[in-house]
């Protein structure tokens, strides 16, 4: 039963991760008010929290609840999947820092969106879309190093 609950939490948090990333992307405009940046900061907090739940529930399944840990450690797709997840986390730091630095001040202030920030959020979303495919391949037995 613990496996089913953990897997369900994992799936829900993946859905929340993607939807909050998509909402962040849709809210990004070339010129933002401070009020909009505060709203983006809240969405980004949900994004980060859901990423943490994805990570913790995934590690819980890999270490204790699913196949033996050796299966995952000897699977190059597992390593690719977690490397991609870490890369997504690292590049998501840039938008988070931008929102954090620009959240205070008068709500009517206008702030220009840094060049490339929207592209970074697109890359995050593309990476998140790749993660379930890698999980399906791994669960299907692909990537095992003999």
Image: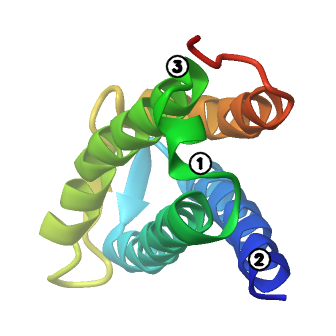
Q: Quick one: quadrant of the C terminus? A: top right
Question: Which residue is drawn at the image coordinates 40% and 58% (left, top)?
Answer: 32
Residue 113 placement: quadrant: top left
State the residue in front, 101 or 21: 21
Residue 119 placed where, x, y %?
47, 27
Quadrant in which the N terminus appears: bottom right
Could you tell me how far apart the alpha carbons at marks 1 and 2 are, in whole angstroms? 33 Å
> Measured from the top left, where is residue 71 in percent x and y?
60, 37
Residue 133 place in picture, x, y as percent: 78, 30
Q: In 3D space, how far apart are the residues under numbered discs 1 and 3 (Cα atoms)?
A: 31 Å
Residue beneath disc 3: 76
Give the label, 1 or 2, closer to the camera.
2
Which residue occupies the extreme top position in the image?
Answer: 146
> Mark 2 = which residue?
3
Q: Nearer the viewer, residue 32 or 131?
A: 131
Q: Secondary structure at mark 3?
A: helix
Residue at point 64%, 19% (across, down) = 144
Q: Horizontal placement of 135 versus 127: left or right?
A: right
Q: CA distance from mark 2 to mark 3?
A: 23 Å
Query: Is residue 88 something that shows in the picture?
Result: yes
Asked if residue 112 can be seen in this view, the reply is: no
Q: Earlier in the sequence, mark 1 or mark 2?
A: 2
Position above or below: 93 against 47: above
| Residue that label 1 marks | 25
Secondary structure found at label 1: helix
Residue shown at the point (60%, 52%) measured from the top left = 68
Tell me which label, 1 or 3, sits earlier in the chain.
1
**Sequence-first tag of 2 and 3:** 2
């Amino acid at each position: 039963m613990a496996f089913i609950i953990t897997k369900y939490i994992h799936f829900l948090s993946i859905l929340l991760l993607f939807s909050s990333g998509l909402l962040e992307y849709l809210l990004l405009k070339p010129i933002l008010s401070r009020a909009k940046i505060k709203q983006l900061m809240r969405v980004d907090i949900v994004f980060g929290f859901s990423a943490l739940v994805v990570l913790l529930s995934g590690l819980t399944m890999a270490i204790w609840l699913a196949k033996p840990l050796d299966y995952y450690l000897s699977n190059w797709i597992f390593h690719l999947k977690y490397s991609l997840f870490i890369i997504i986390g690292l590049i998501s730091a840039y938008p988070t820092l931008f929102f954090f630095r620009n959240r205070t001040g008068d709500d009517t202030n206008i702030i220009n969106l840094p060049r490339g920030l929207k592209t970074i959020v697109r890359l995050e979303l593309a990476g998140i879309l790749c993660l379930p495919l890698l999980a399906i391949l791994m669960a299907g037995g692909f990537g095992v190093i003999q």
